[in-house]
Image: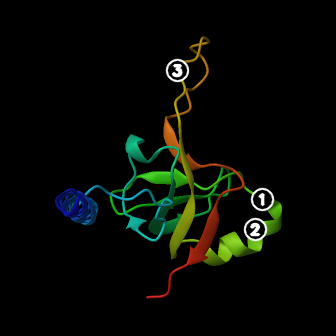
Amino acid sequence: MTGRLSKGLRTATFLSIAIVFLAGGCKHPRSTPEDTTAVSHEVSQTFVGRQITIRGKFSSLVKGDPYVVLDNQQEVYIGPRESTLEDTYSGMDGKLVEATGTLRFYHNPAPVDETRQREPDHFYFEAGTTQLRLVSR
């Protein structure tokens, strides 16, 4: 009986060590919330639907929606122009900003009526998810 008990104890000990070793040595990424601390200087389809932070120059057009111009000249619209933010927008125009939000992509097929101009495809931040802040150098 002593032989069986120690053999069973050895097997249990061996399995415990094997499980701890395998679990500790696992190199798979852990499931964690999206990391929004990384700043992107370009956007692509792979970011669509994810919350990201971009850095670039803010532009507030006289007509149209405000946007951020990235280093590679991509434009990311930050949402509809809000009259309550006009003073804030004018103070940021041409300055370096970081914008965080959920990235979306707009694709407009060719219009049925050829006399109308087609709005170009573009990236934008989903309304209500965007935060914009000046970056001090």
Q: Where residue 132 appears, x then y in whole percent?
A: 61, 69
Whichever of callouts 1 and 3 sits on the residue coming sooner in the sequence is: 1
Question: Which quarter of the rendered picture does the N terminus lie within?
Answer: bottom left
Q: Is residue 137 left or right of residue 20?
A: right
Q: In this rendering, is residue 86 above or below 1?
A: below
Q: Residue 85 versus residue 44: which sits nearer the camera? A: 44
Residue 134's tag is none
Q: Residue under label 3, please give it.
A: 109
Tell me the residue at 49%/65% (across/down).
36
Tell me the residue at 56%/32% (across/down).
119
Q: Residue 137 versus residue 38: which sits nearer the camera? A: 38
Q: In this rendering, is residue 91 above or below 62?
A: below
For mark 1, does the 10 Å Cα neighbourhood hold few (<14), some (14 to 19), or many (20 or more) residues? few
Residue 117 image-quadrant placement: top right
Q: Residue under label 2, please give it.
A: 86
Q: Are marks 1 and 2 in contact (CB under 8 Å)?
A: yes
Q: Residue under label 1, please give it.
A: 82
Using the numbered discs, state the Cα–Cα distance from disc 2 to disc 3 in whole angstroms: 32 Å
